[in-house]
Image (tube, coloured by chain):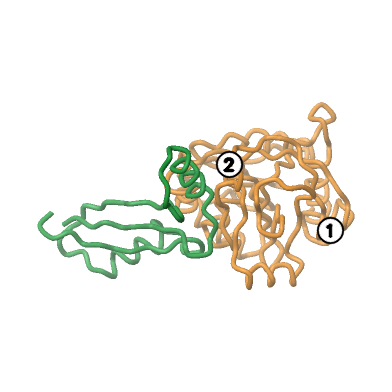
Chain colours: A green, B orange
Amino acid sequence: MKARVFVTLKPGVLDPQGKAIHHALEGLGFSGVNDVRAGKLIELDVDDGTTDSDLEEMCRKLLANTVIENFRIERLANA
Amino acid sequence: MKTAVIVFPGSNCDRDLAVALEQVTGRAPAMVWHKESGLPDGIDFIGLPGGFSYGDYLRSGAMAARSPVIRAVIDAANRGVPVLGVCNGFQVLTETGLLPGALMRNAGLNFVSRPVALSVENSQSLFTSGYNAGETIRIPVAHHDGNFHADDETLDRIEGQGRVAFRYAEEVNGSARRIAGILNDTGNVLGMMPHPERAIEPAHGSTDGRRLFEGLLETVA
């Protein structure tokens, strides 16, 4: 089974990388971009018996730093 | 004083820290590889060096904070053994939870490598007794992820408890409240982005870092 973990900065945490990407988009002439936040996507290939709480524990213990980041887990069916 | 320096793959200030410790204590530290499951007996001080442990994979310090030796470092810290994390070592300490907050990408996005002015905020700790409170010292920084972040409640708490050891006396990396180094609540763990081990001899341009180790030697030995 495959699972995707999206790690994003918590609201209110400054994101200098997102800001730089935003400026670069504006520099390329794209208008109407109001804000950019950069995050991470981590794809896991796990045993079928892996539970939601197993995945959450992986996120809390390593994949995300919950001081500054939120995470969201997405299980991929038939993958 | 018997000291130890933890060495991770990608550490690059481990030898600088070892030289500083040997000069000040008269005894070479034990260099402890990250795969060790324990520390040598009778260690009075543990240093986590600067560098780019595990290539900064995932987040700076994240992998090192889960390495085998860290369990022994956490146990020692909880027993009151002084632990100093410099630069990447500070990042590792926040990732273990021994220190609050997190170190994020510098606000200006650039790697910053230069001597900076620091204000000594707390001269009563194990690590800072060699300084006077309010004194300005010069110590180099060299980091990309030194932007200290914590929520306002945490910042108020660590400031209220006198746990800010050093503050930048100039804008460096966007750190909340210009925090450069913090102590844990029992005062035996210090994390700081500036490199005191790079300001030991006159040839380094400053000897202000030496007093940190001298102060430590005096309080611990």
Residue A9 in sight here: yes
Task: Give the crowd class for mark 1: few <14, some 14-19, many >=20 residues within 10 Å.
Answer: some
Look at label 1 and name its amino acid: Ser
Element assignment for label 2: loop
- Considering only order in the chain, which callout, 2 or 1, is on the residue closer to the N terminus? 1
Q: Chain of mark 1?
A: B
Element assignment for label 1: loop
3D distance between C-alphas at marks 1 and 2? 27 Å
Q: Chain of mark 2?
A: B
Task: Give the crowd class for mark 2: few <14, some 14-19, many >=20 residues within 10 Å.
Answer: many
Q: Residue at x 44, y 53 (%)?
A: A36
* View extreme (top): residue: B203
Q: Is residue A49 left or right of residue B78?
A: left
Residue B187 percent across, percent down from the top left: 71, 64
Label annotation for residue B123: 1
Look at label 2 and name its amino acid: His
Residue B128 percent across, percent down from the top left: 80, 54
Label annotation for residue B144: 2
User: Residue A13 or A31: which is nearer the viewer?
Assistant: A31
